[in-house]
Image: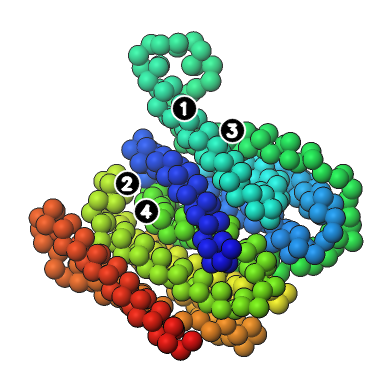
Amino acid sequence: MNPLKKLAGQTAIYGISSIVARLLNYFLVPLHVRIFLPSEYGIVGNMYAYVSLLAVILTYGMETAFFRYYTTEANKKRLFFTSMLSLTITSLLFVVLTFIFINPISSIIPGNGNIMIIYWCAIIVAIDAITAIPFAKLRAENKAKKFAVIKFINIVINVVFNLFFLLLCPWLLKNGYLTEIVELIYSNDVGVGYIFISNLLASGFTILILLPDILKTEFKFDFPLLKKMLKYALPLLIFGLAGIVNETMDRIFLSYLLPKDIAMSQVGIYTACYKITLLMTILIQAFKYAAEPFFFTQSKEQNAKQVYADVMNYFVLACSLIFLGIMLYIDIVKYFVDKPYYEGLKIVPILLLANMFLGIFYNLSVWYKLTNQTKYGAYISIFGAIITIILNYTLIPVLGYMGSAWATLACYASMMIVSYLIGQKKYYIQYKIKNFIIYLSGAMAIYFVSILIKPDNFIFSMAINTLLFGGYILLVYFYQFRNKLKAQKIQ
């Protein structure tokens, strides 16, 4: 099969499942923002920022190390068990330490006096770390459909329990149905805690579904193999930590650097509006799932570098289309959140561009992963983290969450540029830079035109924006067609 078609097929499976699952999950955002005030929803954004940080620490690069050695190790069952046992031990140790030191931990997290939420988050992140290798094994074996189904089930369970606790139980109590039974499992005092309880139940069901695959292995631990994996993974841990600082620490910075009376409210608005960029994040997530094993497999082929360049070309085009689509229809997309959150819509274009640059950076990461120079990934991410920390610390007191948005854009743009410049010296790939500039600048130009000519009438405005979007698609199509003809003449 054509390698691009293979990658596209794998990305489509991951992407479709991610889109359906994410849409179900993101369906909860309109529910949450209409039930909870921004200050309450801010607790959710703040805690999940910590969860994301801890997820990187507890997996410590073992997923990518597993992919790296899966193609070379003859005994794949031993590789699986060694990786799995390592993550299980460290995850259980983390949960025990959290329970022991719960009081000092709860005292340093702003806006969260609920110790139970910290307990639930600790168990969630531990379960997710333990299941990382079983999911990686499915990806390595090209079992994209099974991977997607299990992820989908996880989301469905999460959504069902959210609806159960946040809608059904209050409705039953209000109308006097099954009161005694409902009061055994539901209390109004838990509030946003039910978001975390639902997540915990979904994670528990997921590990039960994966259990048969986990048990079908050779229970032999290979310590020398683990040492090799850890040596490979350590720079990736640093890379991951720096990366998660760039991705989620903005919410933590907001909770610390803004006045206490508005901090959680601002975190809530920022978190809700950030999720409007869901199509871009879905594309990047789906691409990451499919691309990592694809890059390693494709590296054995003679035309590998040409394939990597083509992949990047279509990735940037897809991101440009998503950016333009969301921004031209922002007057419809904004109903994803409620009115108290509308003030944060101005961060959406900034974060869309930031996430596009992050996706390009993931594409560029092929050079240091294939050449076993993962230390450069760590260096670049640390560089990005320094930018994130400095700009958030500088801009948040002045601009609030807008400062976080600009810091995110500056971080990812800098990482993308630095990775490209170093990568071209270490592992040269002839990327189609001219195409990237045309796709992105064209999308930006049409977006600014839509702002300048925006009429007051909503229907008329949407009609004009639809024509602009269609025009962009036609221009890109003819540009691609012209390039294809030129390539054929050269051949």
Of residues 112 and 293, the one drawn nearer to the viewer in this rendering: 293
Mark 3 and mark 1: Cα distance apart in space: 12 Å
Residue type at tag 1: Phe
Q: CA distance from mark 4 to mark 2?
A: 8 Å
Residue 68 position by quadrant: bottom right
For label 1, the crowd category at 10 Å Cα-Cα, with few meaning under 14, some 14 to 19 and many 20 or more, is: many
Identify which residue is drawn at 56% across, 38% down: 154
Kind of residue indicated by mark 2: Val
Residue, x 67% and y 66% (percent of image)? 297
- Residue found at x 49% / y 86%: 491
Q: Earlier in the sequence, mark 1 or mark 4?
A: 1
Residue 382 showing in the rendered view:
no
Say what amino acid the circle numbered 3 marks.
Answer: Leu
Task: Classify mark 2: helix, strand or loop.
Answer: loop
Q: Secondary structure at mark 1?
A: helix
Q: Secondary structure at mark 4?
A: helix
Question: What residue would you read off at disc 2?
Answer: 337
Q: Depth-wise, is mark 1 or mark 4 nearer the camera?
A: 4
Where in the figure is residue 240, as x and y percent of width and height?
A: 63, 63
| Residue 112 locus on image (x, y percent) | 52, 43
Comparing 190 with 330, the one in front is: 330
Q: Is residue 457 above or below residue 319?
A: above
Q: Is residue 143 left or right of residue 309?
A: right
